[in-house]
Amino acid sequence: MSEPALALHGIVKTYGRGRPGEVAVLRGVDLSIAAGEVVALVAPSGAGKSTLLHIAGLLDTADAGHVLIGGQDMTRLPDRRRTAARRAEVGFVYQFHHLLPEFTAAENIVLPQLANAVPRAVAQARGAELLEATGIGARAAHRPAALSGGEQQRVAFCRALANRPRLLLADEPTGNLDPATSDRVFATLMELVRGTGLAALIATHNLDLAARMDRVLRLDKGRLV
C-alpha cells in the first residue's frame, strides 16, 4: 500500500503557551489523506482551520506531533529543506487570489516554476496547458486587474498546481465569489484535482460544496470529527 499523500499525527498548537490567556487551538489532530482524495474541512471562524492548513503545508510548525508528506517526516527538517519541500510538494489556494498585479496571468503561473528551477520554456508550456484546462487560455496575456473574480481565482488554481504538487491546500477558495461564480470555479477546481490525482484538503464554510467532496471533517474544540 502506498503512503498517504498527507499524514498528521498528534498535532498540537497553542498560542500564548505558558502565559495567561493561552489558547489551545489544536489538541492532538490526526489526519490521513490518500492521493486522489478530496477532503473538506469545516469549522467556524477562529476554530483553527487556517492554522491546521498552515502546519500541514509547512508554513507553520506545531508544538507537538508530526507532518508527513508522501511518507517523509517533515517535522524536523531544517528551514531550507522545508522550504524546498513546500515548493515541490504543496500548492496553496486562498480566498483572495494574491496574484502579482504587475504580471500577466501566464507570468503568475510561470514565476513559481522558475523559483523551483524549472526551465522557462517548460514553465511557459505548463502555464499554457493549465490555463487552457481551466477555460481561460485566451486571457493569458491579461493582468489580474483585467480579469473577473472567477478568472483570477482560476489563475490562482493554475499557479497552485504549476509545480505538480502532491498536495493541494485551499482555504475558502470560493469564499470571495458570488454563488453562481463560486459553483463554476469550484467545479473547475474539482476537475483539476481529479485530473491530476493529487490529494486536496479544502477548508470551506459552504456545506453544499463540502458535500461534493469525498469526505467532510469538522474541526471542533481542537479535534477533528
Image (tube, helix red, strand yellow):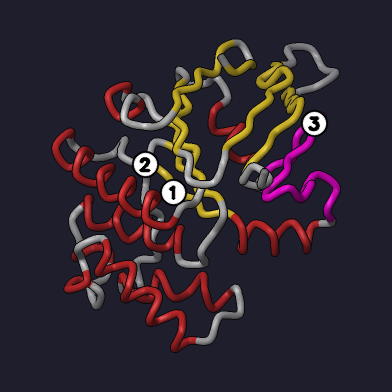
> Which quadrant of the figure contains the C terminus?
top right
Q: Are marks 2 and 1 in contact (CB under 8 Å)?
A: yes
Quick check: 118 above or below 40? Answer: below
Give the mark nearer the N terminus: 3 vs 2: 3
Give the mark nearer the N terminus: 2 vs 1: 1
Q: Nearer the viewer, residue 73 or 136?
A: 73
The residue that disc 1 covers is 93
Of circles 3 and 2, the one toward us is 3
Q: Nearer the viewer, residue 68 or 85?
A: 68
Mark 1: few/some/many CA within 10 Å (<14, 14-19, 20+): many
The residue that disc 2 covers is 173
| Amino acid under disc 2 | Pro
| Amino acid under disc 3 | Gly
| Amino acid under disc 1 | Val
Quick check: 172 above or below 161? Answer: above
The residue that disc 3 covers is 65
Mark 2 → mark 1, Cα distance in angstroms: 6 Å
Residue 72 percent location from the top left of the image:
76, 50
Give the mark nearer the N terminus: 1 vs 3: 3
SS class of the residue under badge 1? strand
Residue 159 percent location from the top left of the image:
42, 63
SS class of the residue under badge 2? loop
